[in-house]
Amino acid sequence: MASLNVGNLGEYLREQRRAAQLSLRQLADATGVSNPYLSQIERGLRKPSADVLQQVAKALRISAETLYVRAGILDEREREELETRAVILADPSINERQKNVLLQIYDSFRRENGFVPGPDADADADGDAGPRKDARPRKGDEAGADATEDQDPHS
């Protein structure tokens, strides 16, 4: 079987597994993914799904987004955007309204610099919907204004 081009994903996973001092069998038990399948991933013979990568990342206590980038599922800029959003959404020192406003400002700066927020801009790093529904600032909006007018009126 020919090796797939998965951005050195298998080598990286092997390094991370060894750094965590886990055998393939132990990783298989921790992830619920079969030992032979994990071995094939490490050898570059299989390209795992995002779900499998998420399970492996959780077991190895590493970033799932990093694995997605290495597997070619996510590009580096998308990963950086997701990580930034996840940090903002996870911050316990600011309330939900402040998080929404901060994300709106972040989006406006990215647009100003030529980056368009991706379709998953409303999701946090775990893939769950964040506290916003397509709340993007419009021209003339103030940073502190509530974003309720941008939400779907049918929800």
Image (cartoon, rainbow, N blue to C red):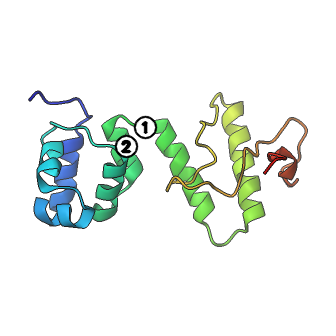
Secondary structure of residue under mark 1 = loop
From this view, report whether residue 16 is shown above or below residue 1: below
- Percent x, y for residue 77? 49, 37
- Left/right placement of residue 141 relative to residue 128 reads right
Q: Give amino acid for label 1.
A: Leu
The one nearer the camera, 49 or 108, is 49
- Left/right placement of residue 100 relative to residue 119 reads right
Secondary structure of residue under mark 2 = helix
- Percent x, y for residue 90? 58, 65
First in sequence: mark 2 or mark 1? 2
- Left/right placement of residue 120 relative to residue 39 reads right
- Residue 121 in sight in this render: yes
Who's the residue at 35% across and 34% down the image? 72
From this view, report whether residue 127 is shown above or below residue 115: below
Quarter occupied by residue 18: bottom left
Numbered badge on residue 68: 2
Contact, CB < 8 Å: mark 2 with mark 1? Answer: yes
Residue highlighted by disc 1: 74
From this view, report whether residue 72 is shown above or below residue 100: above
